[in-house]
Amino acid sequence: MTESHTPRSWLSDAFTVNSYKLGSFAARAMPGPVAGVAASMIGLTLSGSMRDKRVMIERNLKRANPALRGLELRQAVQGAFDSYAKYYVESFRLPSMSKRAVRAGFTIEGFEHIPAAIERGNGVILALPHLGGWEWAGRWLIEQGYKMTVVVEAIEPPELFEWFVELRQNLGMTVVPLGPSVASTVMKALRRNEVVCLLSDRDIDRTGVPVEFFGEQTTLPAGPAMLSLRTGAAVLPCACYFTARHNGHHAVVRPALQIDREGGLREDVARGTQLLAHELEILIRKAPEQWHLMQPNWPSDPGY
């Protein structure tokens, strides 16, 4: 019997799943302002208990804004934890929120790039960083009549991952876990002229494309550029930021990257991925305190 199937592990997994479900129920039952306060309290608790994550967030924030020091840096780090907690609280609440409530707090800049790309008939790839509240933007876009496929990292235990999949499906998204069949599934969605969302600022398996990202060499996923070259889909870098107003979100959609066949496939993918890295820098620098990337992402990071 493996460790993952021991009674102790099973009980731990069950506790984790039930805790998320309880949190989801509580978040949906709260009035919006109360949920906002709860998210801030959760962010404060996480910041105090996850020292290793705090160190990693601090490193990443200083990459995005080297001028951050002292109190300003500590506030930005806390802001990242607050953003992370707010993202989850909002995700729990979104399926039960009205269309009017979602629409009322949402603004978008550069939306015209999405229908323009759809008109070409090859689908759209929205390439995002781990920043702000992208689930909110996803639901808003679905309610404008767009079909959306999202690629997600599988998490443990499987029961928790299945619950998160159901949560996103309730928003109208088609959810595809990372794995051997992800490329073919996503290509089919693009050939149906749908929207595909890819979180693109972290190379999970570290087999991606070498790039310069915030002044350091690392790798980023090849997926956006590779899929664009194979299908003709436009790659639109974008992000969705929390704003100060109640349920406030502001999305920014950047113009399509110029990803064309100019030479060998490897070279074209490398060039397109570097273009995306620069665009992600622009988006993250607009609100680095909302960038909740907590994992090692550069070879110089501890634990990479």
Image: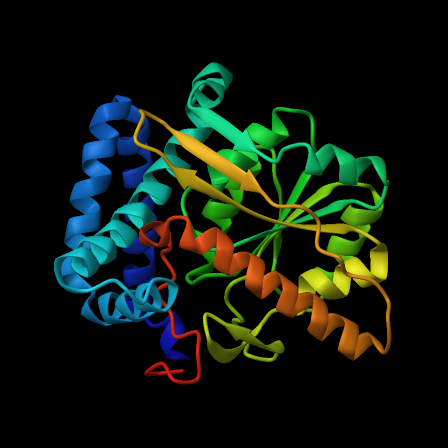
Answer above or below: position of 38 versus 3. Answer: above
Answer above or below: position of 104 versus 262. Answer: above
Q: Position of residue 32 (x, y in %)?
A: 28, 24
The extreme top residue here reads: 100
- Residue at 73%, 62% in the rendered image: 183
Q: Assign the C terminus to one quadrant of the image.
A: bottom left
Answer above or below: position of 294 versus 106. Answer: below
Q: Position of residue 225 (x, y in %)?
A: 72, 63
Q: Quadrant of residue 73?
A: bottom left
- Residue at 47%, 59% in the rendered image: 158
Instruction: Give the left or right position of residue 197, taking residue 40 as reference.
Output: right
Residue 147 in view, yes or no: no
- Residue at 41%, 79% in the rendered image: 2
Instruction: Give the left or right position of residue 69, taking residue 277 as reference.
Output: left
Q: Assign the N terminus to one quadrant of the image.
A: bottom left
Is 275 in front, or is 14? 275
Residue 5 in view, yes or no: yes
Instruction: Give the left or right position of residue 241, taking residue 13 as reference.
Output: right
Q: Position of residue 152 (x, y in %)?
A: 55, 56
Q: How many marks?
A: 0
Answer above or below: position of 158 versus 3. Answer: above
- Residue at 63%, 69% in the rendered image: 274
Q: Quadrant of residue 155?
A: bottom left
The extreme front residue here reads: 67
Colour scheme: rainbow
